[in-house]
Image (cartoon, rainbow, N blue to C red):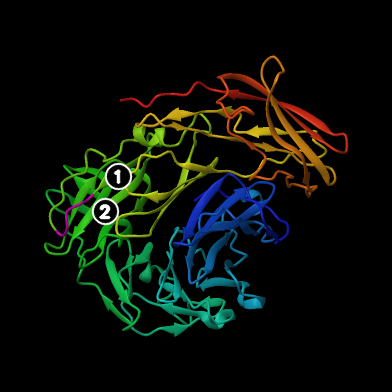
Amino acid sequence: MPGSLAYGGSCDSTNAIISNDMVSLAGNGDTLWVASQDTRLGLGLNDTIAGAQRWGGQYLSCFANYNLQCTAYGSRTVAALLYPVSLYGTGFDSTKPNLLWHYTLGASGPAALDTLSIQFFTSSGINKSFEIDNGVYSGGKFYFCCRGGGIVAWNPSVAGPAGLSGILPGDPIVFPLDSAINASLHPKFATPAGTLLSIDRFGDSAVVVAGDSSVRIYNYVQNSWDSTTVSRNLSKTMTFDSLFVVFTNSFSPTPQPLLYGLIYYTSNNAPDSGLFRYHYGTKTWSLILSAPQTVIAPASRGCLYTVDKGSNKIQVYRDSLPDADTVTLNQPLVSGVIFLNRLNITENPQPQQYNNILFVPTHDSTGHLFIATGSGLYYSWNEIPGITTDTLSFVERAKTIGGGLTETYALPGILNNSYNGSDVLQKSSVTFVYKLARDANVTIKVYDYNMQLTKLVINNQPRKAAGTSGRSTNAAQDIWNGTTDSGRLAAPGVYYYKITASTGERSFGKIVIAKAMQDPK
């Protein structure tokens, strides 16, 4: 997760994206939550529904000196686990509790927005238990695993601390928790004896958890633990050292979820690490990817979206075999170079950091793909993993502009038209972004290099003044697709736009039309 930030401010609703530094994703088929961080605005979560980009969100900057640990989403409720950092983000602050913040779409009152504090007391003092980005929603509850030991389960339908319960590895008895978890009352909880490093869904009625040396499956319907299904045996000449994280790919139709693990091992007296796939029949882990990865996101068709740690490139691998020895995935199904072309970096900034990837299935093979980066959000609304090559759409925080037409711009500033494989021109468009000091009628005109009128975009149309950081732009009308008033395509070159308001305000700007490119045959 991102580095610590120290901030303080208000917890308010917003209709704008908090920041382009998007660090975490959670959601399902109709709602996406994006967590972002900004040194001025603090931590925020935004949601968009059904791909319409109707952004709503919450600033969490009222929680001074807290950082995001993880997010999880389910049943129209988003949960964010926050941990305290010292002033100026210098480390964990043991004087404050962890915070479990949640927000439910469409609800009102305490049921919609609430914050629980969770603090662990051990014989040596307050324990920093939540250290790993691991939270999951399944069967109506959120589950968070603790490095200090045990699982914290939270039922969002129960108000306050009464919705919290504790689960210990191997123990079928679920016990109630309150906001202060005291190890003297629960000797095995919040101690290294029950250390858990990761958690994920395992089918429809269970979660899979991992300690540093074992994997267990917890069936929350039967309150039972299974420690025999998954072993720690590695194939070939490798020796198991420790386990870092386990996760499943439940999108592929198999009798049991495809189970993966990031494992530290020794081979030929040399320590190493890699991504392993578990085989239930032989009870062994097989190395499938030796290159270190910073992000691994399961998808349909047995695919995995990965971010290579060294090159910071997204690649797509496919593990198509069921429960059998899997060959090492030496060659990606989609290389980093090919995927980079999908980002359209001629119009969008090239990400310096990929923070999170989320695939949300919609059918057997297709789904929504979201990529959170340090410069904005990329997405493909109809993605077939390993097959789709279309350009990814891009969303970024709206640039704050001055009012009274003192600062305007065309987004993007370059019109890139291109021909598809059937020689059909695919036209792009620019949106004129501006903010009025007060309500007025607006006219937008486009001129060529010789200042001859090329296009009357809108003529004397009413527009509203915007707020402190808003816009007056009508996104459906204040656009130009590169055509003239006669409907012909304007020639490549430099063009100028003029925005005038009935109040006497005016502004000029520049647009470039690039030469339409043919697709390579």
The C terminus lies in quadrant? top left
| Left or right: 26, with 339 as reference point | right
Mark 2, residue position: 301
Residue at left offset 55%, top offset 19%: 492
Task: Report the amino acid beneath label 1.
Answer: Gly
Q: Are marks 1 and 2 in contact (CB under 8 Å)?
A: yes
Q: Main secondary structure of the magenta part?
A: loop
| Left or right: 389, with 214 as reference point | right
Q: Is residue 126 visible?
A: no
Residue at left offset 21%, top offset 66%: 230
Given the current orientation, which residue lies at the most extreme top position? Answer: 450
| Left or right: 425, with 200 as reference point | right
Residue at left offset 66%, top offset 19%: 448
The residue segment tinted magenta is: 319-323
At mark 2, the secondary structure is loop
Coordinates of residue 305 in the picture (x, y in percent): 34, 47
Q: Is residue 319 or residue 404 the one in the foreground?
A: 404
Given the current orientation, which residue lies at the most extreme right position? Answer: 503
Q: Is residue 298 or residue 422 the one in the foreground?
A: 422
Q: Is residue 42 visible?
A: yes
Question: Please, is residue 214 above or below residue 375 in the view?
Answer: below
**Magenta span contains residue 321:** yes
Coordinates of residue 307 in the picture (x, y in percent): 38, 42
Residue at left offset 57%, top offset 53%: 53
Question: Please, is residue 320 above or below residue 30 in the view?
Answer: above
Task: Report the amino acid beneath label 2.
Answer: Arg
- Residue 153 figure quarter: bottom left
Mark 1, residue position: 386
